Image: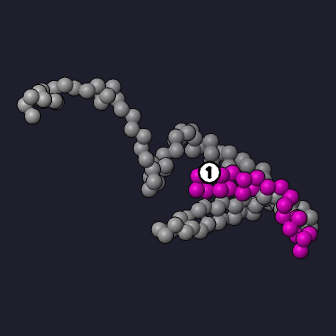
Amino acid sequence: MAERVEQEEIFSQVLRAGRRTYFFDVRSTKADDYYLTITESKKFTHDDGSFHYQKHKIYLYKEDFEEFNDMLKAATDYIVTEKGQEVISERHQKDYKKEDVATEDETTTSTESFTDVSFDDI
């Protein structure tokens, strides 16, 4: 059993990205060859404050690395070319808070909207 645990810890990297965490783990086959697992773990919080993680895993073997890399690069390049670097989906999250950026017209106070009141009148 200890030998199997040792095999699973060959190489590992973690990418934390908001509520998602991505794990890139190099593992060993029974024939002692290596393959890659990519795991997406997403945290969900319940109304009572408790939480759970939902995980999705991809197994990627050496014979598919080159084509996988080519297709991943092509797809990510296409997205950036078509939609740019801005992350639009953040605006649709329920906890999104829009940053108020006041224009020059909004920051200039107009005295026309105020009534001239003297403290003697009160």
Q: Position of residue 24 (x, y in %)?
A: 75, 56
Please tell me whether residue 107 is drawn above or below residue 85 in the rendered image.
Answer: above
Please tell me whether residue 20 is drawn above or below residue 3 in the rendered image.
Answer: above
Please tell me whether residue 80 is drawn above or below residue 96 in the rendered image.
Answer: above
Q: Quadrant of the N terminus?
A: bottom right
- Which of the pair 118/2 is nearer the observer? 118
Q: Residue at x 83, y 55 (%)?
A: 11
Whether residue 108 is visible to the viewer of this picture, yes or no, is yes
- Which of the pair 11/33 is nearer the observer? 11
Q: Position of residue 52 (x, y in %)?
A: 59, 68
Q: Residue at x 39, y 34 (%)?
A: 101
Helix, strand or loop at disc 1?
strand
Whether residue 67 is visible to the viewer of this picture, yes or no, is no
Left or right of residue 62: residue 111? left
Q: Is residue 35 magenta?
A: no
Left or right of residue 7: residue 54? left
Q: Magenta part of the protein: which range?
A: 1-24
Q: Quadrant of the C terminus?
A: top left
Please tell me whether residue 61 is drawn above or below residue 102 in the rendered image.
Answer: below
Per the image, the residue denoted by label 1 is: 17
- Which of the pair 77/48 is nearer the observer? 48
How many numbered tags mark residues here? Answer: 1
- Which of the pair 79/47 is nearer the observer? 47
